[in-house]
Image (tube, grey):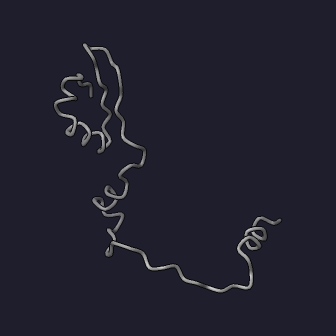
Amino acid sequence: MNIGVRELKENLSKYLEKVAKGELVVVTDRGVAKAMIVPIPGGDQMSIGIEEGWLTAPKNSGELSPPLNLKSKTRTIDLINEDRGV
């Protein structure tokens, strides 16, 4: 979609919504293309997934529980090295 600078200034929110939904906006100045507004790759995949039903919205929000304090006889770096075959 091609739009002029003046139109973009007057309706920026409207065009940003379209871009967020995957549309490409080419900004023109006196008929000459000057810029392109494109969606961020993978930008709103969670919202799309929830809308389409292949993701479920979280039931809880807020702070996470503190991490578990587990004791181990093996250091993490040793496990990583073992996995890498070092």
* Residue at screen point 33% across, 18% down: 33
Tell me the quarter of the image containing the C terminus: bottom right
Q: Is residue 26 above or below residue 44?
A: above
Between 6 and 59, which is closer to the camera in this rendering? 6
Between 1 and 64, which is closer to the camera in this rendering? 64
Tell me the quarter of the image containing the N terminus: top left
Left or right: 68, with 36 as reference point: right
Find residue 52 and report its horizontal and vertical position in percent. Answer: 30, 59
* Residue at screen point 26% across, 14% down: 31
- Determine the image quadrant of residue 76: bottom right
- Determine the image quadrant of residue 14: top left
Left or right: 80, with 62 as reference point: right
Find residue 57 and report its horizontal and vertical position in percent. Answer: 32, 68
Find residue 60 and report its horizontal and vertical position in percent. Answer: 32, 75
Q: In the rendered picture of this protein, how many numbered marks are placed on residues?
A: 0
Q: Is residue 52 above or below residue 68?
A: above
User: Outermost residue, right direction?
Assistant: 86
Q: Is residue 58 above or below residue 28?
A: below
Find residue 21 and report its horizontal and vertical position in percent. Answer: 29, 45
* Residue at screen point 34% across, 20% down: 34
- Determine the image quadrant of residue 22: top left
